[in-house]
Amino acid sequence: MQNKTIFLVEDNPDDELLIRRALEKHHILNQIVVAHDGVEALDYLFGEGAHEGRDVSVMPQVILLDLKLPRLDGMEVLRRLRADERTRLLPVVILTSSDEERDIVESYELGANSYIRKPVDFAQFADAVQQLSLYWLLLNQLPPGA
């Protein structure tokens, strides 16, 4: 599992730290690439801006995407990922504090593969991150070219 990258798009440093700690707690040692807003996320994935020259043929195994992001929200990031041939098949897991029905429905309509509400309790959060990681990094089979 170690060569499979997790791409975390999260603007809250406390949530980022919790996710990292939860992964470490369960010995998930994959590389974690972090973007702190929607523009930075798209720049990384498409090799633009500060990430110009990045080998865009190397994509993450899974994207953990928050919805409430500065500069460009998670819904727009998801919309753009699904509109581009290079990223339309990448697994995107919405990992957010929002439990609003419209956010859940819109996420799936835009092509999210999963929607997970961040638990408040660290033990629950750590268990959710472990299950999420084991499924998307170990069990899930990506289509060719994704």
Image (spheres, grey):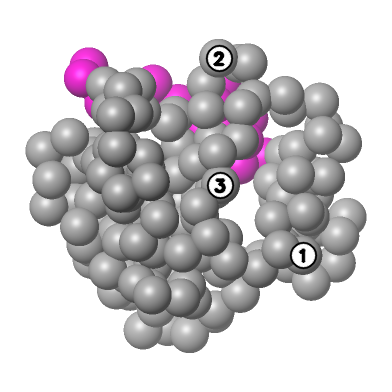
Kindly report the distance in space between the C-alpha atoms of the residues bearing marks 3 and 2: 16 Å
Quadrant (top left/top right/bottom left/bottom right) for the C terminus: top left
Q: Give whichever of 41, 117 is nearer the camera.
A: 41
Quarter of the view holding residue 138 = top right
Q: Give whichever of 78, 131 is nearer the camera.
A: 78
Label 3 sits on residue: 34
Three-letter code, disc 3: Val
Is disc 3 placed on a helix, strand or loop?
A: strand
Three-letter code, disc 2: Asn
Label 1 sits on residue: 14
First of labels 3, 2 by sequence position: 2
Question: Is residue 62 found left or right of 91 in the rendered image?
Answer: right
Rendered residue at 55%/39% (across/down)? 33
Quarter of the view holding residue 17 = bottom right
Is disc 2 placed on a helix, strand or loop?
A: loop
Q: Is residue 140 visible?
A: yes
Image coordinates for residue 20, horizontal then vertical, percent: 75, 44
Rendered residue at 45%/44% (across/down)? 63
Disc 3 to disc 1: CB gap under 8 Å: no
Q: Is residue 142 visible?
A: no
First of labels 1, 2 by sequence position: 2
Please count the marks in the image: 3
Figure check: 70 above or below 116: below
Magenta residue span: 131-146
Rendered residue at 27%/69% (across/down)? 76
Magenta-drawn stretch contains 135: yes
Q: Residues within 10 Å of mark 3 (few under 14, many from 20)?
A: some
Q: Which mark is residue 3?
A: 2
Image coordinates for residue 31, horizontal then vertical, percent: 61, 27
Question: Is residue 31 found left or right of 114 in the rendered image?
Answer: right
Disc 1 to disc 2: CB gap under 8 Å: no
Question: Is residue 98 found left or right of 87 in the rendered image?
Answer: right
